[in-house]
Image: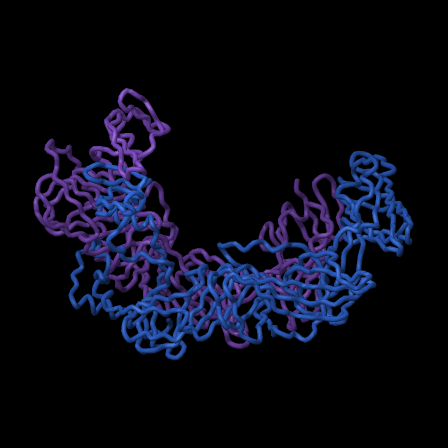
Chain colours: A blue, B purple
Amino acid sequence: MSASKGSIRRFLRPLALLASGVQLGGLGCAASPAPPPAPADRVTASTQRSAAAERERVAVTVYNANFALVKEERNIKLGVGRVSLAYEDVSAHIQPATVHIRSLDAPEALVVLEQNYRYDLLTPDKLLEKYVGQSVKVARYNPKLGTDEVKDAELLSVQNGPVLRVDGEIVTGPFERFIFPELPPNLLSKPTLVWLLDSTKEQQKVEVTYLTQNLSWRADYVLVLTADDHHGDFSGWVTLDNQSGTSFMAASLNLVAGDVQRLAPAPPPAPMVEMDSAEESAPQANFRQEALFEYHLYGLERPTDLLDKEQKQVSLLEAHDITLEKKLVFRGLDYAFRGRWGEVIKNQKVSAFLVIDNSEARGLGLPLPQGIVRVYKADSSGSQQFVGEDAIDHTPRDEKIEIKLGEAFDVVADRRQVNWQSLGKCQAESDWEVEVRNHKDAAARVEVVEPADGEWQVTKSSHPADKRDAHTFAFVLEVPARGATKLTYRVRVRWC
Amino acid sequence: MKSKALIRARGFMTVLGLLGLGGVGTLPAAAAPPATRVSEATDRKAVSITVYNADFGLVREVRELAGLPTGQVALEFRDVASTIQPETVAVKALGNTGGLRVLEQNYRYDLLTPETLLAKYVGRNVRAYRYHEAIGKEDVVDAKLLSVANGPILQIGQEITFNYPGRLAFTELPPNLIAKPTLVWLVENRAAAQTIEVSYLAQALSWSADYVLVLDEKETQASLVGWVTLVNNSGTSYRGAALKLVAGDVHRVEQQQDMRRMKTMAAQGPTDASFREEGLLEYHLYTLERPTDVLDQEQKQVALLEASGVGIQKKLIFFGQQYWFQGQYGELIKNQKVSVYLNFQNTAKNRLGMPLPKGTLRVYKADKSGAKQFVGEDAIDHTPRDEEVRIKAGEAFDVVADRKQTNWSALGNCGSESTWAVEIRNHKDEDTQVEVREPAGGDWKIVDSSHPAIKDDASTFHFDVAVPKRGKTTLTYRVRVRWC
């Protein structure tokens, strides 16, 4: 496309045609220094078609946000001169504005004059519309005779249903079927990409790239916990879904992990849950990983077939014996300290989390593309049971992932405001009591996290209060097996 | 270049002049019914279309009409865009001026549909057909159509009925019902052959630019290729059309087009491959150097510009949120995304310096095997030369940040002071620089900060934070805000 040579060629041709004498009808405005109407121009373009059979290589790079970059090489017999090339077997969800063609073996021998994406499709409605004012036939099946009765008709209008003149009368539907003498030109059976090219080499190897919607991938992780809940095996799978309408055989497959900025066809929002899953980077069997811009690129080492309407899974990573941490968290309510409360709901749920440090020290340390972590644990008979799942966002190495597994069954808590006292217009002090009960046969450690607004101070507490940030403090409670632990504290709050 | 433009300008003024005449010279139609003549696309000798960004285009076509009756003629002008704005149509005769005068211009859209046909036959006789499966023939009865509101009601003999199974036939076509919206001129004609030029505005013709920016290995230089993408959904094909594009936000009120050409600027793209560019009023006009076919329901792309060795800067920016400092925040979302931006100067010094029409810019970068991969896209607005282009490429994978309010205290009813810690972690194998950009509401003041705060405007300040490879940097600051 580049070559200034190309632009010169393009500039000269219309001028030559002008000279050859097609008279411009005086298109007002003397508008165009150029263009005579181009019948002659069009005649010179020979028409070629290229289908999937000519495809020599195809590479597909799939992104998280339901789109992909397709790059294919075809060896096409173009001929020499001005060629109109219809390019078939591209994805049905192609974004035509992103298509680019170039010649690989002779870049100078191929000049793109224009690129067209035609979608004037042959449909029953279009066919009728093109025949308005013309003669058609209407046919009706006569069940008695077993033949069609055919009548000549003139199609008068097709607005809101056809109106015909048959035997001198004006009639409207219903009609059984219409018969047309021939196909109108320029109606296509499917959207088609057509290039107008100047070619100076008979046979050319071309590379075509485009973006397409409806190819997506995500990561699926499996974390198998050991009996003590503090170690596990972590494996990652890539799940690829092809709904692009086209199969890509023997494709070299790349995946890009990262949030790439896209416009218009908005990708579905990524789940914004934050979880940590720990993984260990074992030998990456299938994919080689590299940095690309500010993202990560995974290349599959061998070509693979991506069939249309197919979901494919390929192993991404495996890590054995990673170290992780289980956490029980009891979370308070916002804005609790200003107001007055009675006994707050009983037996509130205590949430269970897994915290994974994605570091080499813990047996991981890999970029983890966004996906879903599913956690399994072996029961006493040794068979694995599902214990929870959560979504994780793109997680670089050395970051922590927190996965919510669910709510603990055997650990519950009550929260009560036992005292409230006003200290002027915008200050209050209250006493709180949190009772955590553990009905398991093993001791449990529970984190009690309290969000606080305003300017607050814990004036007294049974356990040490840890200030996490301007509006959060937390306590750590050890709860014995089949026992209960009571936490009490007093908070003073000022909000103006 | 200059003289050419002047000639064109003069040509255009002529059109405007005639347009004025056409409006003034309306005369009452003569009593005798005028002869009728239909003109279709086959009469078309030349067509030119000028497409604007805002989903409309100016179509100008020349048709040769042979065998035209003389006297008053109703000229039906078919095969125009179905999205035509009829009030913008202007017609004039070329050549033997004075031979053709437009008396009236009508745009008819009383369409022939099954419903309008029925409506026109209310109170009249129709025939009702019913098909007999057993005998394979149709029964015919005469009926009177009494009403069509909510379904036809018929009088057959002395009986009134509705829901009559079968179809209705009508004796003749009511006048003035047409198959498609049609332009009809009443003209006073004196010559058998006429060449006329018609211009009008049509909707559903649009164009935008698509750019491809290919980054080099170090992400400091790039090549830029621009394409024009034209979409025609106007309902008509324009074959062998002279194509022009106007870049700019043209104001449209009741279809008033100000099309004066004021001055010409030399085209200046380094490789202005297919299009010639010139200034047009306060916009830019691009002309395709050869005729082209613009088919209905087609998207067409033609090269617009090309430049290489364009210097670019990559920037990582971490954005805050508005009005943060007034409020109180607990634990904020962790591992927030740091955005990646690319900037380049649209200057001649930077090997660009040409008007960039609004469109989509897509960024590609080669991976280690040399294959180009897509790394993001963003929209750019009309960008004149010597302006900066800034696009967002995406979110960085390996650089994340947490923002935490570490302390908050009230300063009366409408003031507060809070301390913040922003921890930026870089998990890449190279050092990086992150701009932390904080929008602030109210009357704010940075009391103290670990990195120098740079005030950008009344409600924005930023910090430049260097983050070592595989390391982290914590930025802390204290801000005091009053909001009344």
Residue in the foreground of this view, choosing between A69 and A5 = A69
**Left or right side of A60 for B230:** left
Residue in the foreground of this view, choosing between A31 and A226 = A226
Residue in the foreground of this view, choosing between A327 and B243 = A327
Is residue A402 visible to us here? yes
Q: A207 above or below B124?
A: below
Quadrant of the snapshot with the C terminus of chain A: top right
Residue B303: x and y in percent read: 36, 65
**Left or right side of A277 for A445:** right
Image quarter of residue A102: bottom left
Residue in the foreground of this view, choosing between B156 and A37 = B156
Image quarter of residue A279: bottom right
Quadrant of the snapshot with the N terminus of chain A: bottom left
Image quarter of residue B350: bottom left
Residue B125: x and y in percent read: 23, 27
Residue B229: x and y in percent read: 38, 59
Is residue B448 visible to us here? no
